[in-house]
Image (cartoon, grey):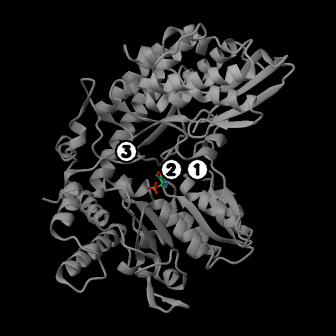
């Protein structure tokens, strides 16, 4: 049970149960859809930009608690970031989910709860789906896959 | 004593499977993913080791004693597969890398070599990708061969009216359907399907990857034109499978892969093809795997397909009682004739989360779309499903353990 709580800490369960910003934005400047073809998990990320910074982020999706909680946390974590900073953050989150080490920085207060995925190799891609989708949106792509 | 009539002694059988004595975090391993790949009995491992330790050389090639022994053993594996499927002739057994390569062989050699432009292949909505994608590739390679679909009912059974309607269009060259669904557990009425196909001049292929493990298969009684199965689901090794095909078809079919062992004569300009089965077995075959598959076939034959079926029926009955009692659980499919494969969803948890949760209790189940995406779309299960599948070593207690873990999961994720 104790190690299950590493994958499902209270923050993850809270975001999975009460997802934040789970809607389509009215004005979308960048968006992408991410799929995990093996399990059917899907996340769409919508971004509104102002002066090159992310003014608003939202998501829609379906899937396991980890993939949906991760998307929900993402929408809160990327606010105010420029494209480059958001890509940097995203890479750090993906690295954290893979190796389990939490980087410094205030944005990781909440995001740190995604680090537990590292102990569940088959679940890392659940934690990273929203982030590869964010990266695709920022790079102007439309589709991403966590495979 | 006739072994086939003895009841299955599951505890004794479990001792043949070394992996089943493992514990996971202090709990016994409960392996409920045999539908994806089954565990292996010691007899299979011993046979593969003996092949390497005492009788290993390339087959069909050397004129020395060891190669002759290896060749004889290899051909004995073919004979075991013939017996297992009750094929009329041993030349009708092609040893392949598995079901996937068996079906691709048919799509290539029969599909490209014998189907005519304007003809269609029919598959059902509940196929494993292995019996869908090769036919899509055939359709798309510009030969004018089409692809049609047999609908399934909401219960997850093949809709025979839909099959009939498609056949009546008169352009069907091949019906390629599963003999047992790897998601729904549905066993399809193969004999009736073959009869209907033949009445309309179509050939029929059965994907027996699941069925051959659960039912006695008699390709002559079914009047199957093609039948495919894969060794690793039958308690044998990976990397080997079988394609049965009627001799008249094999004789008329061009080769699939080109290379050594499949030719009669070769000049720099051209080659002539060897007779079947060699024509379809280019290159050094899976020699060690064939020894393992032979041992696996002998293993299940010694237990008896009838005894295995009876055991499976009791597992299915038990699961049908115990699983629906778990609050919030919905079984996928409700076919009358079904084998030991159960897909389900739970209201409170996504299949992935479920699988991770029960894994912490040592229970292995599959989560996802089980290589059957179109079926999950058809059933409105975009998130996939969780699946428990049984083997001859599965016990009632393991099904109870799953049910209990699902109840706990429901509390955890609620
Ligand atoms: C119904 C069905 N068909 C085909 C296959 C493919 O078998 P293999 O991967 O051994 O080629 C499987 C197993 O994955 C299956 O369950």
Q: Chain of mark 2?
A: B
Residue B268 image position (x, y, % from top left)? 52, 90
**Helix, strand or loop for disc 3:** loop
The answer to whether mark 2 and mark 1 are in CB contact below 8 A is: yes
Label 2 – label 3 distance at C-alpha: 14 Å
Q: Nearer the viewer, residue B51 or A97?
A: A97
The residue at the point 67 percent across, 63 percent down is B164
Q: Nearer the viewer, residue A111 or A102?
A: A102
The answer to whether mark 2 and mark 3 are in CB contact below 8 A is: no
Which quarter of the figure has residue B14? top left
**Helix, strand or loop for disc 1:** loop
Specify few, some or many for label 3: CA neighbours under 10 Å numbering under 14, 14-19, or 20 or more. many
Q: Are marks 2 and 3 on the same chain?
A: yes
Residue B263 image position (x, y, % from top left)? 45, 86
Answer with left or right where residue A25 lies relative to residue B137: right
Residue B287 image position (x, y, % from top left)? 30, 68
**In this figure, which residue is indicated by the disc labeled 2?**
B181
- Is residue B182 something that shows in the picture? yes
From the Cβ of disc 3, is ligand 1 less than 8 Å away? no
Answer with left or right where residue B319 lies relative to residue B8: right
- Whichever of callouts 1 and 3 sits on the residue coming sooner in the sequence is 3
**In this figure, which residue is indicated by the disc labeled 3?**
B34
Q: Chain of mark 1?
A: B
- Is residue B195 something that shows in the picture? no
**In this figure, which residue is indicated by the disc labeled 1?**
B126
Label 2 – label 1 distance at C-alpha: 7 Å
As drawn, B170 above or below B3 = below
Residue B393 image position (x, y, % from top left)? 27, 43
* Circle count: 3
As drawn, A133 above or below A113 = below
From the Cβ of disc 2, is ligand 1 less than 8 Å away? yes
């Amino acid at each position: 049970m104790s190690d299950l709580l590493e994958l499902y800490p209270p923050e993850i369960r809270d975001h999975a149960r009460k997802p934040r910003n789970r809607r389509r934005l009215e004005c979308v400047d960048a968006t992408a859809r991410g799929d995990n073809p093996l399990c059917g998990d899907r996340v769409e990320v919508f971004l509104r930009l102002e002066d090159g910074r992310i003014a608003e982020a939202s998501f829609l999706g379906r899937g396991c608690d980890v993939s949906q909680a991760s998307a929900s946390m993402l929408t809160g974590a990327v606010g105010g970031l420029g494209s480059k900073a958001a890509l940097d953050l995203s890479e750090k989150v993906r690295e954290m989910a893979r190796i389990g080490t939490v980087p410094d920085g205030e944005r990781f207060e909440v995001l740190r709860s995604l680090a537990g995925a590292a102990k569940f190799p088959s679940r890392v891609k659940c934690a990273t789906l929203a982030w590869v989708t964010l990266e695709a949106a920022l790079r102007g792509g439309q589709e991403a896959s966590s495979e | 004593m006739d072994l086939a009539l003895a009841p299955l002694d599951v505890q004794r059988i479990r001792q043949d499977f070394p992996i089943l004595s493992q514990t996971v975090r202090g709990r016994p391993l409960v392996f409920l993913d045999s539908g994806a790949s089954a565990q292996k009995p010691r007899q299979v491992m011993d046979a593969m080791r003996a092949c390497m330790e005492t009788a290993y050389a390339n087959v069909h090639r050397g004129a020395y004693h060891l190669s002759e022994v290896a060749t004889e053993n290899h051909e004995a594996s073919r004979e075991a597969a013939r017996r297992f499927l009750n094929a009329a002739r041993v030349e009708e057994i092609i040893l392949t890398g598995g079901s996937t390569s068996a079906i691709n062989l048919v799509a290539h050699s029969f599909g490209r070599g014998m189907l005519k432009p304007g003809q269609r292949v029919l598959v059902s909505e509940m196929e494993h990708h292995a019996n869908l994608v090769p036919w899509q590739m055939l359709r798309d390679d510009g030969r004018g061969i089409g692809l049609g679909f047999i609908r399934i009912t909401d219960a997850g059974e093949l809709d025979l009216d839909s099959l009939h309607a498609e056949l009546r269009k008169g352009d069907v060259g091949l019906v390629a359907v599963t003999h047992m669904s790897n998601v729904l557990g549905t066993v399809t009425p193969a004999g009736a399907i073959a009869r209907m196909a033949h009445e309309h001049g179509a050939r029929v292929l059965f994907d027996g990857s699941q069925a051959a493990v659960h039912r006695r298969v008699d390709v002559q009684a079914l009047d199957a034109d093609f039948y495919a199965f894969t060794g690793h689901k039958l308690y044998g090794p990976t990397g080997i499978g079988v394609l049965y095909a009627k001799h008249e078809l094999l004789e008329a079919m061009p080769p699939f892969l080109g290379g050594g062992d499949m030719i009669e004569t070769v000049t720099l300009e051209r080659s002539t093809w060897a007779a079947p089965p060699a024509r379809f077995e280019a290159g050094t075959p899976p020699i060690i795997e064939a020894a393992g598959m032979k041992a696996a076939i002998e293993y299940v034959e010694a237990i008896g397909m009838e005894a295995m079926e009876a055991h499976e029926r009791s597992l299915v009955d038990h699961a049908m009682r115990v699983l629906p009692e778990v609050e919030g659980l919905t079984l996928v499919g409700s076919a009358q004739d079904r084998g030991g494969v159960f897909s389900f969803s739970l209201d409170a948890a996504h299949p992935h989360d479920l699988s991770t949760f029960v894994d912490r209790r040592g229970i292995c189940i599959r989560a996802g779309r089980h290589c059957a995406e179109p079926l999950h779309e058809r059933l409105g299960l975009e998130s996939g499903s969780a699946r428990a599948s049984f083997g001859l070593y599965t016990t009632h207690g393991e099904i109870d353990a799953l049910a209990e873990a699902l109840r706990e999961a429901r509390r955890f994720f609620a």
